[in-house]
Structure formats: C-alpha cells, structure tokens
Amino acid sequence: MSEASARPIRLGLVGIGKIARDQHIPAINASPDFELAATASRSASVDGVPGYRTIEEMLAAGHDLDAVSFCTPPVGRHDLVSPAIAAGLAVMIEKPPAATLSEARAMTRAAEIAGIPFYTSWHSRAARHVEDARSWCAERQVSRIHVEWREDIRQWHPGQEWILEAGGFGVFDPGINALSILTAILPKSVVLSAATLDVPRGRGAPIAATLQGTSGDAAFSADFDFLQTGEQTWSIHLEDAAGETLSLIEGAGAMTLGGERQPASEDSGEYPHLYAHFATLVREGRSDVDLSPLELVADAFLLGEHRATEPFSF
Ligand code: NAP
C-alpha cells in the first residue's frame, strides 16, 4: 500500500457484534492510522458508515479498501476471509484465528501466496504486564505455572449460543487468552499431557476444562470455568526454582511479585495496541501469525477426556 502510506488505511470491519462495538470501533475511531470505510454484517451496521450484509457486497461496492478486520465467531472464518485475501487486502482477525488448525493454516498460506499482510491478533498479549512477565521468565528457571481463568458466561457472553456449539470453543473462548499469554512469555513450549473437558448435555463445546502438562522442566496446570459467579478470575501464577513468585492477575492488566501488587504504568489499552501493530504490518507489508495457542486448544480436544455434565441454558 505504498501510495496509501501517507493517508489513513481504509478499513472494512466484518461482524458487528459485542467485541466490534466494545473494542474495535472505539480503537479504530481513535486511531490516526485507520478510517472505518465500510462494514459487513448480516443484521447490524455502524451509524454513519456504509454497511453491507455480506463481505462480497462490501468488496464490490468500491470503497477503495486497503484492509479488512474480522470480528465474527471462529466457525466460518476461512470462507469469510478468503474473498478479502483474493481481493489483495490486508487482513486482521480476532482470536481465535479459526475453528480449526487446517483452516488457520490454509488462510495463512493463501495470504503468503497473495503477498498480503495477515495478522492473527491475540488481544491478551497486549495486556499491560505481559512484557514484564516475559522478562521475568527469561531471567530464571520457572518451576511451576498455574492458570485460573474463571468467568461467568452469562455476564460476558449473554445469549451467544454459538460459543457452546461445536467449533465455538466453549470455555476455551476465554481460556485461549491465557494460553496466548503463556505462549508469549514462556521461553519453552507448553506440552500437554492430560486434559478434561466438561460438556453440558445437548451442547457441543466445554463449559469447564482442566489442562496438565509441562514447559521445559516446569509443571503446568490450568483450570478453566465458565460458571464462575461473583468475583471473576483471570490469573496466571508463576513460581521459580528459588520459590519467588509472579502472578498476572485481571487478565495481565495487573501483576504481583511475591504477593505485592506492582505499580501500573500508563497504557493505552489492548485494542489500540493491536491496531497500531496492524497499521505497522500494513505499511511495511509484513504478516504476524502465531497459531500456538490454537494448537494447545486443539491438543486439549484431541487428548482430553470428554465428560457430560448438567444441561446449560443462558
Ligand atoms: P457476537 O457478539 O456474537 O458478535 C459476532 C457477530 O458476528 C454477530 O453479531 C454476527 O453479526 C456476526 N456473525 C457472523 N457469523 C455468525 C455466526 N455464524 N454466528 C453468530 N454471529 C455471526 O460475538 P463477539 O463476542 O463479538 O465475539 C466475536 C469474536 O470476538 C470471537 O472470536 C471472540 O472470541 C472474540 N472476542 C470476544 C470478546 C468478548 O468479550 N465478547 C473479547 C475478545 C475477543 P450479524 O448477525 O450482523 O452477522
């Protein structure tokens, strides 16, 4: 996009739902790098922005787009994203990148062949203390890693039936955020050795899960729960061989060392970081693709013991 490098990147946004409204649209509107030029969503639009029901209609409408950002659920991403790649547009996708590894790899390969910037975003990696935790892990021998990611599905995903359908990831929809942080901060790969997946009768995806494994010499465990009421927990606890501890809490928006909460630095927020990074990728013609969090979720489904639990309704 050399001719466009001096002007804002003209962006199409696909899938106008909760995360588009809560985070993407405010971040895009506040960014000097982007102009929201058009949207595609079956039943929603954004005031003042030309809206279309399908991506094909949006691409055909001649808005001189440079890039498209996708905020739809993971199932169906490959079919949605392919026309944007075929049109030669840069692509950014919400986590998780796709419902399957094969789809995610097919999109990545298609983007490589087309020579377009392709960004599989992981918003939790842009949380305030992720880089602090990465430095901490790099300087010592981590011996224990425990993830507690417990939230109330009814509070955070009201009426999102797709999330408990096959391909909707269930509790791994938030849980993959913890895995995206872990795979960014640990120097050694996480390898799963066991998992349990609790799937409510009549649903296609787990409402709770546990993971066990290793990262080098460190023992790894995770507890994911979608039925947590009251206080919500998005924590990663790390301990080194000398017994020193670091905990990322509040989704890595806060951190404790030896149990003491650390001061918070100024931060613009996760989604402004994501869009600033995407702008750099678009202007430099580069991609940023990491499927390792998705690989761990896929492994949990491959390895895990599936247990039927009580039916769930929103
Ligand atoms: P959502 O509220 O259900 O919105 C998704 C939108 O995508 C829908 O409003 C729908 O708009 C469109 N869509 C296209 N195909 C769909 C299908 N088969 N089923 C349902 N909707 C479909 O979901 P969301 O919470 O925004 O999540 C979307 C993505 O963002 C997911 O990958 C999720 O992991 C990620 N995310 C969500 C959050 C969060 O807090 N909710 C946070 C970070 C990331 P139309 O009906 O108009 O087409």
Image (cartoon, grey):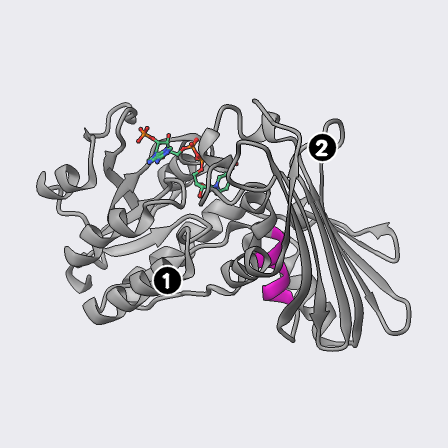
> The magenta stretch spans which residues?
178-185
Q: In this view, does 72 lie above or below 106?
A: above
* Front residue of this view, candidates 1 and 165: 165
Which disc number belongs to residue 228?
2
Q: In this view, does 98 lie to the left or right of 246?
A: left
Q: Is residue 219 visible?
A: yes
Mark 1 belongs to which amino acid? Answer: Ser
Helix, strand or loop at mark 2: loop
Q: Is residue 86 magenta?
A: no
Mark 2 belongs to which amino acid? Answer: Gln
Distance CA(mark 1)–CA(mark 2): 32 Å
Mark 2 surroundings: few (<14), some (14-19) or many (≥20) residues within 10 A: some
Q: Is residue 199 above or below residue 220?
A: above
Helix, strand or loop at mark 1: helix
Residue at image location 90% in from the left, 73% down from the top: 242
Q: Is residue 127 visible?
A: no
Q: Where is residue 148 in the image (x, y as percent from the top left)?
A: 73, 48
Front disc: 1 or 2: 1
Which disc number belongs to residue 102?
1
* Front residue of this view, candidates 96 and 197: 197
- How many callouts does the rendering have? 2
